[in-house]
Image (cartoon, helix red, strand yellow):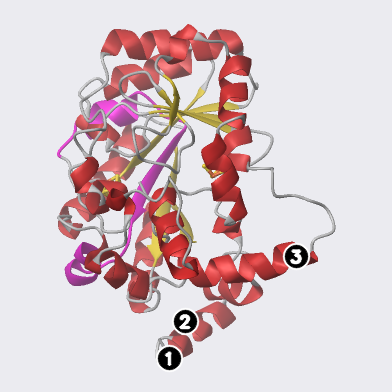
Amino acid sequence: MQKNFLMQKDKYQYSVEIAGSCNLRCPSCPVGNMRDVKEERPTKLIDSNLFYKIIDKISSEAVNKNCFVSVFDWGEPTLHPELPKFITYINQKGLKSRISSNLNHEADFRSIIRSNPTEFQISISGYSSEVYSTTHARGNIFKVKSHMYKLRQYADQFKASTEFHVCYHVYKHNFADEFEEMKKLSKELNFKFIPILAKLMPIEKNLAYIMSKNGENNKFNDKKNFINDQDKKIIDLLFVDPYEEYKEWKKKSKLKKNNLTSYCTKREYKTPIRVDGSVGLCCAVYNTSLKVVNNFLDLPHDKIHELRKNNDYCGTCMQHGLHDNWKMKQSQLFYKSLLGNNFISKLQRKIFKNFV
Ligand code: SF4
Ligand code: SF4
């Protein structure tokens, strides 16, 4: 999933990946851009018993009263036929449930909405077929739109309290007219429209890109993470070139008085659990080797957190600003305004499209 990393510090999140792969092949996502490492990744569906045990443990550890369980990381959760039961179970435990879907699979949306997930995110990157399928490769926008209508219909029918978020991934090819159209559709359906500047994922690709531009090399720069021609094409479509972002971050971090380089919200506020029950270093890395525990059930939360904190990959990630810079551009005045909801923002999008 293109991630909405805008985490709130009063919330703790677990991502329990229930499907280890996806029906789409987005070029900005490791499912699409790291196919060669797929044998290493657990890509099946989660075993139901394992899922319930994981939820029991999360519930008993009660890290935070405002605890969200997202049933995805690098996969499409609607592929799992037990999804409605999983959502019901999470809700019964007093936890908050979150789904993120590309809405391309003919899933049982009736049962899914009836189970009343707390939040349902729709990940999308266009309004027309041509634009959408460039960045949601293999996707069909007509299916997506028809499923969006179904979600609204079922939510009304079952009086679901679900909050729907349309997470619109913003690239250079979709930020003007397509953006307005999808905003309009979201409004019609009473879904919250949330534009997010798209990024290249995962962290490993970014690190390889930055280090190669810097002429650096080290043990983490594995061949499978290297930037290929497809990655270069997607980087050209991004507002956030990872190397430019790194240079900007470097300048800013030198000016900071406090040493904030060892703090990462993705590590402090989120635990990623993969389909086989193992715990990844964080939700933004993909390689199987970047895991800290083979089974989430074996160790208490604090111990797992300690192991994540002591992992030396984080040090390299932090030295290159990748733990910190994901929100940098999105919070700049120009981009805040570009993605905004008022008349000036609309005008800015209209004018700016002639310059990119
Ligand atoms: S829909 Fe989400 S998980 Fe699937 S390939 Fe695209 S970004 Fe990755
Ligand atoms: S420092 Fe980097 S690798 Fe470590 S948890 Fe944060 S984002 Fe992930």
Q: Is residue 308 above or below residue 285?
A: above
Q: Secondary structure at mark 3?
A: helix
Instruction: Identify the residue shown where x is 41% and y is 62%.
Output: 209
Q: Is residue 319 above or below residue 274?
A: below
Instruction: Identify the residue shown where x is 47% and y is 81%.
Output: 349
Instruction: Identify the residue shown where x is 35% and y is 75%.
Output: 236
Quick check: is the Cβ at mark 2 less than 8 Å away from ligand 1?
A: no
Q: Which mark is residue 254?
A: 3
Q: Quadrant of ligand 2?
A: top right
Instruction: Identify the residue shown where x is 22% and y is 24%.
Output: 45
Tag 3: amino acid: Lys
Badge 3 or badge 2: first in the primary sequence:
3
Residue 267 placement (x, y as % from top left): 58, 36
Badge 3 or badge 1: first in the primary sequence:
3
- Residue 104 can be seen in this image: no
Q: Name the one closer to the observer, 122 or 225.
A: 225
Asked if the residue under mark 2 is in contact with the one under mark 1, i.e. CB atoms within 8 Å, the reply is no
Label 1, label 2: how far apart the Cα atoms are: 10 Å
Q: Name the one closer to the observer, 203 or 173.
A: 203
